[in-house]
Amino acid sequence: MYNTQNISKKTTWTGRTTVELEHHHKIINLRSNRNEDLSNIKNRRKSEYQIDSRIIINVSGLRFETLKTTLERYPQTLLGNIRRRSLFYDKKQDEYFFDRHRTCFESILYYYQSHGRLRRPEYVPLDTFLEEITFFELGSDALKQVQQAENLEEAQIIHLPKNPICRFIWSTLEYPQYSILAKIINIISLFFILLSAVGLAVETLPKYHRATNDQCQNEA
C-alpha cells in the first residue's frame, strides 16, 4: 500500500492523472471529428442544393442549362416567375420547352447571367428579336437598351384636328393610304413635281441656253 501511494503521488505532479489526460484527448478528438463531419454534411447539402437548383430549358431542340437563382434575379419576367414558367414544364423530359427562336434565346439567357445586359445577334432581324423580348417579358428596360443600341426612335403621337372637316382634309393630304381620293391627289401632286423637275432639266440644255442669252442681249 505504501509503494502504490508513492507511485500515484509521483505521476500526479501536473495536477491531473494520466487517465484524465487521455480522457481529455479523446474528447478533443471527438470534437474535431464532429466538426469535420458537420462541415462534410454542409458541403454535401450545398452540392445537392446546387444540383437540385439547376434547370434545363429546351428551345426548339437546343438545350440550355442554368441555375434557378440566375433566373430569379428578375421575377417579373417569364423565366424568373415560377408560375408563368411552370406552364411550359414537360414532366416526362424534366425540362422547360419553348418553341421559339434558338439564336435569340442565347442573348435572352445572357440577359439574366450578366445582370441586365442585352445585345442583339448580328444575324438576327430586329423585328424577330423584339418579338422574343416581348414573349419572354423582359420589360421596358430591355426594350430601351435595344432602342439605344439600334438608334431607334419612338413613334410620336399625332393629335388630329377635332373638327371632322379639317380632320378629313388633313388626313387626305397627309396620308395617301387614307382613301382613294387621297391616292388620286397624291398621284397628281407627284405628276406636277416630276413635270417641274423635267422643265428645269430642259432649260439647262445648250440649245435653250443660247436662245435665252440672245433674248437677254436683244432686250439689253
Image (spheres, rainbow, N blue to C red):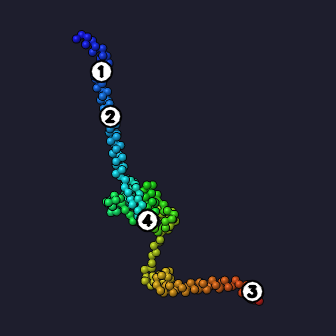
Q: Secondary structure at mark 2?
A: helix
Given residues 92 and 132, the one toward you in this image is: 92
CA distance for labels 3 and 1: 132 Å
Q: Residue at x 30, y 14 (%)?
A: 10
The residue sitting at 34% across, 62% down in the picture is: 88
Which is more N-terminal, label 3 or label 4? 4
Q: Position of residue 174 (x, y in %)?
A: 50, 80
Callout in the foreground (2, 3):
2
Decide: is 95 above or below 45. Answer: below
- Tags 3 and 1 in contact by the CB under 8 Å rule? no
Q: Closer to the camera, 139 or 163?
A: 139
Nearest to N terminus: mark 2 or mark 1: 1
Observer-side mark, 3 or 1, equals 1
Which amino acid does the dot numbered 4 rest on? Answer: His
Badge 4 crowding class, 10 Å Cα cut-off, few under 14, some 14 to 19, many 20 or more, is some
Q: Position of residue 96 (x, y in %)?
A: 36, 60
Q: Earlier in the sequence, mark 4 or mark 1?
A: 1
Query: Circle 4 — which element?
Result: loop
Q: Is residue 120 left or right of residue 56?
A: right
Q: Amino acid at mark 3?
A: Arg
Q: Is mark 2 in CB contact (under 8 Å) with mark 1?
A: no
The numbered mark at residue 101 is: 4
**Label at residue 210:** 3
Q: Earlier in the sequence, mark 2 or mark 3?
A: 2
Q: Which residue is mark 2?
A: 33
Q: CA distance from mark 2 to mark 3?
A: 113 Å
Crowd around label 1: few <14 · some 14–19 · many ≥20 (10 Å): few
User: Residue 15: percent from the left, percent from the top?
Assistant: 30, 19
